[in-house]
Amino acid sequence: MADLRARIAIKHMLDDALERDDTPLASILEVAIRTLDARIKAAPNLDQTGAAPPFAALVGRNVRIGGRRMTLKLERAFWDMLQRIAESNDDSIDAICTAIGATCDDGNLASAIRVYVLKNCAQPKGYM
C-alpha cells in the first residue's frame, strides 16, 4: 500500500517535471516509478492468490455476545489462540467473548480479548 501511494506521488512529480521540461529529474522519476511498479507487481495479490493477510492485518469475525451478534476485528494470531483456548477449555469463542465482555469496563472488547489471550498464554490452563 505504501508503494502504491509513493508511486502516485512520484507520478505527480513526474508530470510536473515534464511540464517544466526538466528532463534529468523526469528520467530519475521514471526509474523510481519502474522500480515501484516491479515491487507492486511482485507483491502477492491477496484477492487472486488467496494468500493469508499480513501478520498484523485485522481479521473480522462475527461473534454472539449475550445473544447479540457483533463483528470483532483481531489479528489472525489472536483468533488462532482464542480458538485454541476455547478448545482446551471445552468452550466456544462466543462464550469466552461473552465472559470477557462482562468484565470489560471501558467498552473496548477487542483490547480486552487481546489481554485475555496474552494472560492465558502465560498460564497453562484457563485464565478466567
Image (cartoon, rainbow, N blue to C red):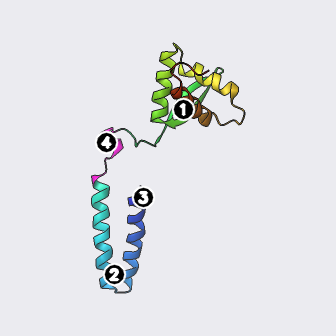
Circle 1: element type: helix
Question: Residue 84: percent from the left, percent from the top?
Answer: 46, 22
Question: Residue 5: percent from the left, percent from the top?
Answer: 43, 62
Residue 126, disc: none
The residue at the point 45 percent across, 34 percent down is 77
Between marks 4 and 2 in the image, the one whose residue lies nearer the viewer: 2
Of label 3 and label 4, which has the lower sequence position?
A: 3
Of label 2 and label 1, which has the lower sequence position?
A: 2
The stretch in magenta equals 42-51
Q: On the rendered image, what quadrant is the C terminus found in?
A: top right
Circle 2: element type: helix
Q: In the rendered view, tell whether residue 101 sits above or below residue 38.
A: above
Residue that mark 4 sits on: 48
Kind of residue at disc 1: Leu
Circle 4: element type: helix
Between marks 3 and 4 in the image, the one whose residue lies nearer the viewer: 3
As measured in the structure, the alpha-carbon distance from the residue carrying label 3 to the one carrying label 4 is 20 Å
The residue at the point 42 percent across, 41 percent down is 55
| Magenta-span inclusion, residue 50 | yes
As measured in the structure, the alpha-carbon distance from the residue carrying label 2 to the one carrying label 1 is 51 Å
Kind of residue at disc 3: Ala
Residue that mark 3 sits on: 2
Q: Residues within 10 Å of mark 4 (few under 14, many from 20)?
A: few
Q: In the rendered view, tell whether residue 33 sits above or below residue 80.
A: below
Residue that mark 1 sits on: 118
